Image (cartoon, helix red, strand yellow):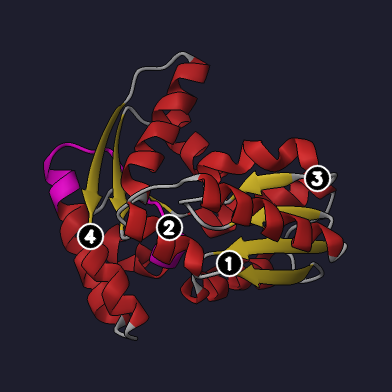
Amino acid sequence: MKIGIIHATCNAVPPLNAAFNELAPNVTVLNFVNENFQYYANQIDGIDDKIHRDFANITFTAQDAGVDAIIVACTVLTPIVDVVKPFITVPIMAVDQPMLENAINNYEKIGVLVTNAPTGPLTKAQLENIATDVGKEVEVDTEIIPQAMTELKAGDEAKHNHLNFLAASELKARGCEVLVLSQITQSVAEKETEKLGIPVLTSPKEAVKAVTKLIGETVR
């Protein structure tokens, strides 16, 4: 089996690949990286027709590589995954969908940590849409910490993790029952934020479990 992963930052490659190595080592992973997705989305503070076109093009490239399924590992892009589904023949899923469904199904007040500013309102909207679909009322509280992403890109993982911890502390103080680390790159802060004593959800492992189930591959 071969899985294609679409990334908007090189920092997201190691966490998801590590999850595959741990849970599904027999799966071949191909990474397709375009860092301009994140850079451009930050410049325009959202997504536009150019991002839609570029996203469609990279999914076609992944499909042409012969993958059995595609994971979209950029939270800026995940809200538009459904746009390309009619045009490709392999399953495609947003990396954060299983994590967000977990949050909605099990909690009422959800704290979302975001290190890429445009992701904040997009993740909040996704959670609220899932809640509407299942007929559940939830409250979503968000902390946006772009400085953490800056520190991670500069190689300071410890500072990145500490900034996530501080923001998570604010969310806990405001009554959140669970913490959602909305981006793959934030998974390195999981252990740090778990020190607060409330559940912490990250996307890589949940996504690997979901996509391997989708294609009939066994996970460890």
Per the rendered image, the range of residues in magenta is 170-186
Foreground pick, 130 / 79: 79
Do labels 2 and 1 touch, CB within 8 Å? no
The amino acid on which the numbered mark 2 sits, given as a three-letter code, is: Gln
Front label number (1 vs 4): 4
Q: Position of residue 210 (x, y in %)?
A: 67, 47
Please tell me whether residue 160 is drawn above or below residue 215 in the rendered image: below
Q: Residue most toward the bottom? A: 155
User: How far apart are the two marked residues, 1 and 4, measured between alpha carbons?
Assistant: 22 Å
Foreground pick, 56 / 6: 56
- The C terminus lies in quadrant: bottom right
In the visual, does 52 lie left or right of 136? right
In the visual, does 155 lie left or right of 64? left
Q: Is residue 198 magenta?
A: no
Please tell me whether residue 40 is drawn above or below residue 53 in the rendered image: below
Q: Position of residue 171 (x, y in %)?
A: 18, 46
Q: Which mark is residue 139?
A: none
Q: Which residue is mark 2?
A: 183
Q: Is label 2 in a helix, a strand or a loop?
A: loop
The amino acid on which the numbered mark 3 sits, given as a three-letter code, is: Ile
Q: Which residue is mark 4?
A: 145
Q: Which residue is mark 3?
A: 88
Q: Residue most toward the front? A: 50
Q: Is label 1 in a helix, a strand or a loop?
A: helix
Tell me which label, 3 or 1, sits earlier in the chain: 1
Q: Which residue is mark 1?
A: 16
Tell me which label, 1 or 4, sits earlier in the chain: 1
Q: Residue most toward the top? A: 135
User: How far apart are the two marked residues, 2 and 1, measured between alpha carbons?
Assistant: 11 Å
